[in-house]
Image (cartoon, coloured by chain):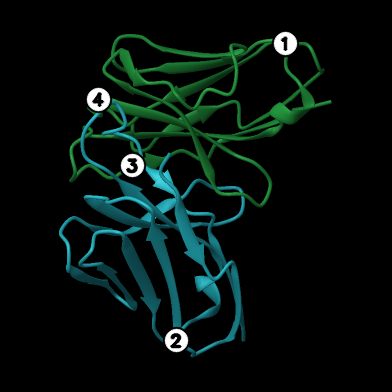
Chain colours: A green, B cyan
Amino acid sequence: GAGVSQSPSNKVTEKGKDVELRCDPISGHTALYWYRQSLGQGLEFLIYFQGNSAPDKSGLPSDRFSAERTGGSVSTLTIQRTQQEDSAVYLCASSLGTAGRSPLHFGNGTRLTVT
Amino acid sequence: GQQLNQSPQSMFIQEGEDVSMNCTSSSIFNTWLWYKQDPGEGPVLLIALYKAGELTSNGRLTAQFGITRKDSFLNISASIPSDVGIYFCAGRSRGGTSYGKLTFGQGTILTVHP
């Protein structure tokens, strides 16, 4: 597609429920990234994929967070047993590769609210 | 881990004024990027820098990759109301499992008064 697409754009869930956030990267981009942005804060790295593998998942806050990528394209970020502190905007980005001259292109994010 | 210190945290300026913001890092980066984020949207790339000492312009925006590879600045000349938003610096380092990811600064909130 023309840009990185994320769905849903907004998600309200009750504490304790599981949620799945989806990211469709730009066609042909092999690298995919998930970041989290809390209100008024910078971007916190969660995980990135090169193809279908995740060389760096060091930013996942806890074992309630997991992500997968299939077919070198779509990625899903899953949060189990959501907590109120999980409320944030979850941003996905993709890049042509991970080499230096491959800037990240971001989607508009999924705003998650845990009540 | 890697940390980026971005300053100032916020700026309130008059239309037509020039703006300068910068980022410093505790470690070396081989790529510096500057992004702008509008409300409800994802960050959009403004300028990319790939070489120490590089000075790059994009319209009224100018950014430089510091010689030490631990800092970068962004200047905006003759600001206009649509420059309002949050500006982020981001750095990417070489090597290891962190090779691909960007580390972001905390952002500079820019307000432009007409």
- Mark 3 to mark 4: distance in Å? 11 Å
Question: Which of marks 4 and 3 precedes in the sequence?
Answer: 4
Q: Secondary structure at mark 2?
A: loop
Question: Which of marks 1 and 3 precedes in the sequence?
Answer: 1
Disc 1 target residue = A81
Same chain for the residues at labels 4 and 2, yes or no? no
- Mark 4 to mark 2: distance in Å? 38 Å
Q: Quadrant of residue B14?
A: bottom right
Disc 3 target residue = A104
Badge 3 local density, few (<14 within 10 Å), some, or many (20+)? many
Same chain for the residues at labels 3 and 4, yes or no? yes
Is A14 rendered above or below residue B86?
A: above
Disc 2 target residue = B18
Is A110 rendered above or below residue A17?
A: below
Q: Secondary structure at mark 1?
A: loop
Is A84 rendered above or below residue B68?
A: above
What's under tag 3, amino acid-wise? Answer: Leu
Q: In the image, what residue occupies the spot 62% across and 86% down?
A: B114
Asked whether, in this view, residue A105 is left or right of residue A86, the answer is left
x, y (%) of residue A105?
36, 42
Badge 2 local density, few (<14 within 10 Å), some, or many (20+)? some
x, y (%) of residue A17?
75, 11
Closer to viewer: mark 3 or mark 1: 1
Q: Nearer the viewer, residue A4 or A36?
A: A36
Disc 4 target residue = A30
x, y (%) of residue B53?
17, 68
What's under tag 4, amino acid-wise? Answer: Thr
